[in-house]
Amino acid sequence: MRILKVIPENLRESEEAVIEAAKVMLAGGMIVFPTDTVYGLGCDATDEIALRRIFKVKKRLQKKPLSIIVRDIAMAKKVAFIDRRLERALNVVWPGALTVILWRRHKLPEVLTSGQETIGLRIPDYKLTYLLSENMGRPYVATSANISDEPATTKISQVLKYFEKSYLKPDLVLDAGDLKCCEPSTVLDLTAAKPKIVRIGPVDKKKLLEILSV
């Protein structure tokens, strides 16, 4: 489990580490990375073998789907059905700490969504994850960097503790130190006529009200 230091506020200093992290994911590996909420565990969302490793390292039930990060709405449209109304709504809340559940296109492995017809997507308001997206050129998993049933964390020491004794470990950790105290993203289901809040997180309440009224 290699560890590379990054400074999210200074991407010039962190660029080489982020590029290396993207290479690891493109080669089928797993990484830990900082986000605008908590530390995330990621892999190439198009790689079924890597996805199955994510479930194993987290000890996560395969009936629980994984969410992904996309670079922009254009990339989101490749994996989910987004009409003009939805696009207007998404432009209100993205980028931000909001995971949106949409009807999926059948272009990603079934294991990612646990065979469900929906998919959770996010565009964080965070330069480091955007740089990862730029270098990946494809969606990547963004699940919390913890063992299932343990709390998500902003503390790098806790992340390392979760995985230090595991047989399977992430291949690379982007260590940004302790993140600003925050909660996992808000989850909003937009697959029905009426939006449904699945989980409340740190998303701006004004933005959430705007999307609910679109």
Image (cartoon, rainbow, N blue to C red):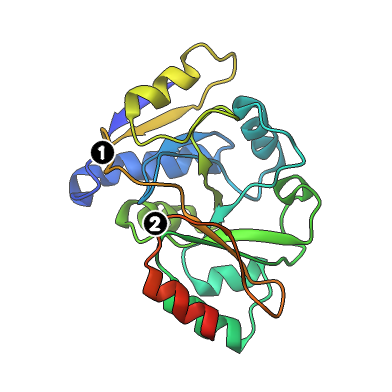
**Residue 49, image quadrant:** top right
Q: Nearer the viewer, residue 60 or 33?
A: 60
Q: Residue 60 appears at what percent x and percent y? A: 67, 32
Q: Secondary structure at mark 2?
A: loop
- Closest to the observer, 141 or 60: 60
Identify the residue at horizontal 53%, vertical 74% (top origin). 74
30 relative to 82, above or below? above
Q: Residue at x 57, y 53 (%)?
A: 68
Residue 21, how many percent across, how many down? 42, 39
Q: Mark 1: which amino acid?
A: Val
**Pointer 2: what residue?**
202
Give the Cα separation between the discs numbered 1 and 2.
24 Å
The residue pinned by badge 1 equals 6
Tag nearer the camera, 1 or 2: 2
In the image, residue 84 lies at what x, y percent? 59, 88
Identify whether 48 is placed above or below 156.
Answer: below
Count the marks.
2
Assess disc 1: are there few (<14), some (14-19) or many (≥20) residues with their C-alpha within 10 Å of its C-alpha. Answer: many
Mark 2 Cα shell of 10 Å, populated few (<14), some (14-19), many (≥20)? some
Callout 1 secondary element: loop
Report the side of 196 relative to 94 (left or right). right
Q: Quadrant of residue 17?
A: top left
